[in-house]
Amino acid sequence: MKFTIDIDITNNKALAFLNYIRTLEFISIKEKDSTTEYILTEEQTDLLRERKQKHLNGESKSYSWNDIKKELKA
């Protein structure tokens, strides 16, 4: 079983805790920055595939970037 814990290392107590758990042999720590990748669920992936297929078949509306910019400026 895996757990994800976000630790604010600017807090001295949190940093002490992190340093302590680093000493435990059954804990492995993988540091990640704020650009952490996100994993989509299977349902989300299926929905994106479905929407892509509708787009490719011409069954859904689509807009160019220029169309979007014009709409935003209006």
Image (cartoon, grey):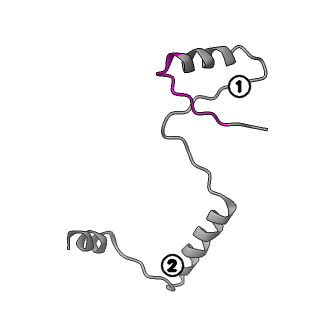
Q: CA distance from mark 1 to mark 2?
A: 43 Å
Q: Which residue is mark 1?
A: 28
Magenta span of residues: 4-12
Q: Residue at x 69, y 62 (%)?
A: 42
From what the image shows, is residue 10 above or below residue 38?
above
**Magenta-drawn stretch, dominant element (helix, strand or loop):** loop
From what the image shows, is residue 65 above or below residue 11?
below
From what the image shows, is residue 15 above or below residue 66?
above
x, y percentage for residue 61? Answer: 43, 82
In the image, is 39 to the left or to the right of 58? right
Which amino acid type is marked by label 1? Ser
x, y percentage for residue 50? Answer: 61, 75
Which amino acid type is marked by label 2? His
Q: Which mark is residue 54?
A: none
Of all residues shown, which one is farthest toward the bottom?
59
In the image, is 24 to the left or to the right of 53? right
Element carrying mark 2: helix
Q: Which residue is mark 2?
A: 55
From what the image shows, is residue 67 above or below residue 44?
below
Residue 26 image-quadrant placement: top right
| N-terminal label among 1 and 2 | 1
x, y percentage for residue 45? Answer: 63, 64
